[in-house]
Image: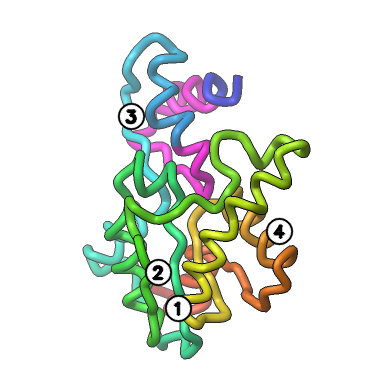
Amino acid sequence: EIVSRIVVAAERLKVKCVINPECGNAFTAIRWEGPNLMGKPFGFEVKHILEVLDELHAAGKLKTKGKDKRPLTYHDPCQIARRGGVVEQPRRLLGEVAEDFREMPDAGVMNWCCGGGGGVSANSRAEPLRLEAFKVKKRQIESTGVHTLITACANCRIVMEEGLEHYHMKVEVLGLTELLAEYLVEGE
């Protein structure tokens, strides 16, 4: 029903592009499953916000000033990276605002799931499984030596915050758009 409401509104407004925020499941639902659910191709593009921000940056329309001094790493959300192919865009954007970016092992399309994929995060009975799966992500994060983890999926953020708390890890989780906003040049 949510996809239908978005599509109907986009068609009524005659938009050229629907921009999906930091949510891997919503990105999948509207970009790939949406046309099947609606029974027709869309008359507009569907892009993840990181694709749009990267395009704006490449065109000189997204200007940043300064760099975050903290060591940072990036978690590639499954639906956005593996299914969506949005892998280089977040790294280019991080390159603009991160002084010390540290890549996790098996990054990009090979990055390990946060533990909440496949609806596991919505199933309270699956919490032990989710926390067990998070051990691999925990090792990836620990290998970078960072205390700040960046991602582009709200579901991943919640699941990772739960896992980090469970394993008593002092790691802050931020959205990439949130980090970028801190370094945008005002008035540009």
How busy is the neighbourhood of tag 2: few (under 14 within 10 Å), some, or many (20 plus)?
Answer: many
Q: Is residue 86 above or below residue 28?
A: below
Q: Position of residue 153 (x, y in %)?
A: 53, 52
Foreground tag (4 vs 3): 4
Q: Residue at x 46, y 61 (%)?
A: 75
**Label 2 vs 3, first from the N-terminus:** 3
The range drawn in magenta is 6-27
54 vs 100, nearest the viewer:
100
CA–CA distance in space, label 2 to label 3: 35 Å
Tell me the kind of residue under disc 3. Phe
| Three-letter code for the amino acid on which mark 1 is drawn | Thr
Of callouts 2 and 4, the N-terminal one: 2
Mark 2 to mark 4: distance in Å?
20 Å
SS type, badge 1: helix
Mark drawn on residue 144: 1
Q: Which residue is mark 2?
A: 104
Is residue 130 magenta-colored?
A: no
Instruction: Report whether 61 appears left or right of 163.
Output: left
Identified by mark 4, the residue type is: Glu
Q: Is residue 186 visible?
A: no
Pointers 2 and 4 in contact (C-beta within 8 Å): no
Circle 3 residue: 44
Q: Quadrant of the N terminus?
A: top right
